[in-house]
Image (spheres, grey):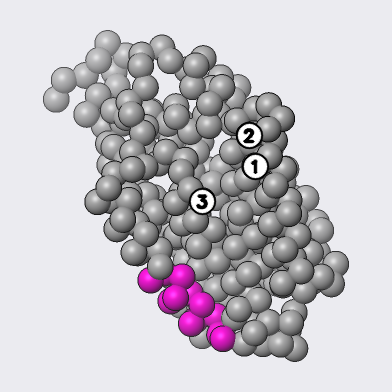
Amino acid sequence: MRRTALGTRPDREPVAAKVPEVTALFWVIKVLTTGMGEAASDALGQASLVLAAVVGLGGFALGLRLQLRTRRYVAPVYWFAVAMVAVFGTMAADALHVVLGISYLASTTFWAAVVGIVLWRWYRSEGTLSIHSITSRRRENFYWGTVLATFALGTAAGDLTAAQLGLGFLASGVLFAVVMLVPALGGLRFGMNTVVAFWFAYVITRPLGASFADWLGKPSWFGGGLGYGDGTVALSATAIIVVLVAVVSVTRSDVQRPAEPHDDDRVASRL
């Protein structure tokens, strides 16, 4: 098999950005995966901690393996990986509180630090945090490390507002919906850096989706929920995700065009 002068394996490197273009459907599916991950993690934990660990860790490993083995963006593979990261990220955040007894404030602070460190290492290494630049294995690894950390951070932040601060699930969901206006309006109206706006929004969508999922699934005596059940919420969200991923798979409306060579400076200023 031919190798380059640097010893890399060109057939194992991505040839185009391996993440979707940011569209309205991207954010809809992203919020749904956060809610699904929260509800599925809770449902599995209530059924069996062993089952939860097997599904969470096994699904996480399988999802990333499939994603890393592809050379281009493939919508079902990508969103399956995101869904499994959502489940595993929820478990990782919950473990700090449930298993180790760490407060939600401390776990939120911890995961915020992890997100900051991963982004800092990524930028120091690559000079860009743009999702339009995910065209190498190293950048892809940084991307998925950031995604995992943001899911855990969002879970901890949602639990902090709903439980420790006593807002309940619905009020927490409304709070994070309002916070989402910061990157939305900042990017569209006030010249906020689009890469910063993207990652800001990416973090906030996690507690946003999880709060509304908990509101729908949990009983009224626990955070003011509607009591439909975590399993029902997880299955319903999964069904909608499957339909929407099928839509983008057929229309290919979320496929990024390949970046031009030496294009990092330009893409760093875009989402």
Helix, strand or loop under label 1? helix
Report how far apart the C-alphas of labels 3 and 1 lie in the structure. 12 Å
Q: In this rendering, which labeled residue sits more in front, label 3 or label 1?
A: 1
Local crowd at mark 2 within 10 Å, few (<14), some, or many (≥20)?
few
Report how far apart the C-alphas of labels 1 and 2 lie in the structure. 6 Å
Part of the protein shown in magenta: 228-239
Question: Is label 1 in contact with label 2 (beta carbons under 8 Å)?
Answer: yes
Viewer-proximal residue among 258 and 55: 258
Q: Earlier in the sequence, mark 3 or mark 1?
A: 3
Q: Earlier in the sequence, mark 2 or mark 3?
A: 3
- Please indicate, yes or no, whether residue 122 appears anywhere in the rendered image: no
Local crowd at mark 3 within 10 Å, few (<14), some, or many (≥20)?
some
Q: Which residue is mark 1?
A: 184
Specify the amino acid type for callout 3.
Trp
Helix, strand or loop under label 2? helix
Report how far apart the C-alphas of labels 2 and 3 lie in the structure. 16 Å
Q: Which residue is mark 3?
A: 27
